[in-house]
Image (cartoon, rainbow, N blue to C red):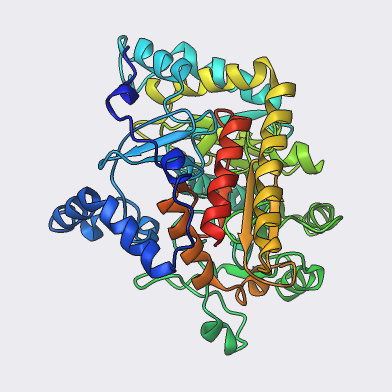
Amino acid sequence: MKSPIQKYSTSAVDDKITHSQAFSPLLREENARRKTAGSLERWHRASASLAGGVSSGLRRAARPYPLYFSHGQGATLYDIDGNEYLDYTLGWGPNILGNAPSEIVEAVYESMQRGLTFGAQHDLEYIVAEMLTQIIPCADRVCFANSGTEIVQVALRLARAATGRRKLVKFEGHYHGWDDSVLQSYHPTARQLASGDSKPIPEGLGQLAASSTVIAQWNDIESVRAAFALHPGEISALICEPLMCNSGCIAPQPGFLEFLREITRQNGALLIFDEVITGFRLGLSGAQGFYGVTPDLATYAKAVGAGTPLSVLAGKLEFMELLERGKVVHAGTLNGNLIALSAARAALTILMRDSESIYSNLFRRGEMLRDGIASILRERGHKLCTAGEGPVFHLSFTERQPQNYRDLLVADKQKYSAFVLALLDEGVLPLPDGRWYTSTAHSDTDIERTLNAVERAAE
Ligand code: PMP
């Protein structure tokens, strides 16, 4: 297949090196708008038929407006106006092998010749399941669905069935999909929090009151103890992102995950790790291997499907057998479809083939990028905190290292947004919320080019 890149030869990053004058945020915005007129035109057109002009609400946060892309290759994305970007969004996580990795594309294409979905059994199901049970510590069994939101609901239902209890504990700032039960106290505003009420705060209108959800604070042992003490014998599960990627990539303090393991066990509740982001990003065994704490159940999406719609629940047999016996219902027309499982098999094959060097490079380059950006910004007098692990990290303009969601509220978001806009103008694309993802497709040269662009953006 001929690479489509040859049609678009603009190199925004390199062209920029020749004019490195300082730009004001306004000028940056003007530049970005001028270069992306085709995106604006399309976004206006789309908004007349597609609600908000985007397919997922969070994408509306992009500045100056949501961009339209023509294609991606490796570490690079190309927009519809022919601009080229070093891509650190990676589809919001799934593209851990970069954009359009040939082994995945070929595997999907080959599999598609035989069918898209059977709604019945085929070899890829147990092949992928065997790979997953081999690498995930808590996986005696797995089951498949299509999105992270969906699979989290399977996990929570299983926990309720296993314990005969209704309530769940989740942390403020953690994201587990958009179902009413978990889209609570995700990103509450300072004003919403000021009331001091510890009730779950729904993210938007139309959500049912989450009377079964109890909110705790990340890295705060006492708040977790209080949650269990206030609802004795009622908590079915505690769910968390083992690394709080959706709010500042804040790592668990030493001993915190071990404490969660212990308190759930003592109280007869299940511990669920939502590894939708950390799965296969922090290593083959995900966060549970990385931090050395094994949950009862774990959910996966994003990287496991390498850009196709696939999610996975992995769990211990004593719980998963409720699915096996049909006591707990888990269904889905497209579950286990050939597109997703052929992509998963190809992605896992690549990651398992040479995992040591793959992950050591992913971590080394992630850290090189994060440390490089931090020192450039700090040299220029900006107060910056960085957090995260290797290939997923977060930057915030704040003085004190955040330990939970509330600490992040004081970060200067406007300044970060201006920084992202300047980066866009320099041909570098991170997520709008401070998060950066790196992939196996990013080379040392890509990181160096990015740091050069950061130097110019930092002006
Ligand atoms: N859990 C976590 C930790 C996530 O980051 C996400 C998505 N960002 C989800 C669940 C929901 O996954 P999906 O968007 O596939 O429904």
Quadrant of the image occupied by residue 303? top right
Instruction: Please name whichever residue, 108 or 89, is drawn nearer the observer in this view of the structure.
Output: 89
Q: Is residue 361 above or below residue 173?
A: above
Residue at 55% across, 28% down? 441
Instruction: Please name whichever residue, 223 or 118, is drawn nearer the observer in this view of the structure.
Output: 223
Q: Quadrant of the N terminus?
A: top left
Percent of width and height locating residue 2 = 31, 14
Percent of width and height locating residue 442 = 57, 32
Residue at 59% across, 16% down? 349
Residue at the farthest right position: 255
Percent of width and height locating residue 239 = 64, 55
Q: Quadrant of the C terminus?
A: bottom right
* 451 on left or right of 374: left
Q: Is residue 367 above or below residue 411?
A: above
Percent of width and height locating residue 146 = 42, 37
Quadrant of the image occupied by residue 315? top right
Is residue 272 among the parts visible in the rendering?
no
Residue at 46% across, 22% down? 101
State how many labels appear. Answer: 0
Is residue 365 among the parts visible in the rendering?
yes
* 384 on left or right of 195: right
* 420 on left or right of 115: right
